[in-house]
Image (cartoon, rainbow, N blue to C red):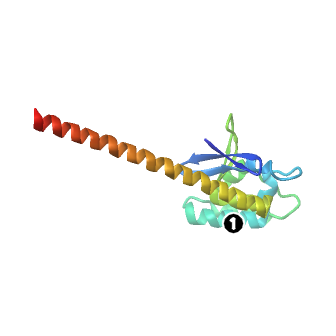
Amino acid sequence: MKKIQVNGTEIAVSQINNEDFICITDMLKAKDGDFFISDWLRNRNTLEYIGTWEKVYNPNFNFDEFNLITNRSGLNSFKISVKEFVERTNAISIVAKAGRYGGTYAHKDIAFEFAMWISPEFKIYIVKEFQRLKADEQKMIGWSAKRELAKINYRIHTDAIKNNLI
């Protein structure tokens, strides 16, 4: 679990099925007032974006159930939790975790849209910090790969010397 700092808010970034997921529960701390993820999830534009994402990346997405949910969105009486949304639609773009590192995590594509709901400025800063995190990870991978190659080359050279000089 990695953390990034965005305008004084610490936000967790986690790997789920080899994909980057960002804790939108942490992101919510940057929004003024009492807002909940279910407030964002009841918005028709939010649902349409998630539905489109799921259409592209999730062959098991339940579009029939999703259409029922979307038809109710925007009504004053409509409210849906992340857990209920995932259970009813088989969504993979958003995950509710319990426990020590609990919270609601969204695929980076969805999390960036959530950041826009907080504010355009917040979205710009979270994208910038996420890109910095990924660049740092790439530097570490490059360093590690060079180290492994040097280690392998050392063994090849020492084995060749042993075999040819002895």
Quadrant where the C terminus sits is top left
Quadrant where the N terminus sits is top right
Q: Is residue 65 above or below residue 5?
A: below
- Pick the residue in front: 126 or 22: 126
- Pick the residue in front: 6 or 67: 6
Most extreme residue toward the front is: 165
Identify the image quadrant of residue 151: top left
| Residue at position x 55%, y 54% in the image | 135
Indicate the secondary structure of the residue bearing disc 1: helix
Residue 84, x across and y down, in percent: 72, 50
Residue 136, x across and y down, in percent: 55, 50
| Residue at position x 78%, y 53% in the image | 80
Q: Which residue is mark 1?
A: 49
Q: Is residue 98 above or below residue 35?
A: above
Q: Is residue 90 visible?
A: no
| Residue at position x 72%, y 63% in the image | 47
Q: Is residue 143 left or right of residue 103?
A: left
Residue 55, x across and y down, in percent: 60, 65
Q: Amino acid at mark 1?
A: Tyr
Residue 63, x across and y down, in percent: 64, 64
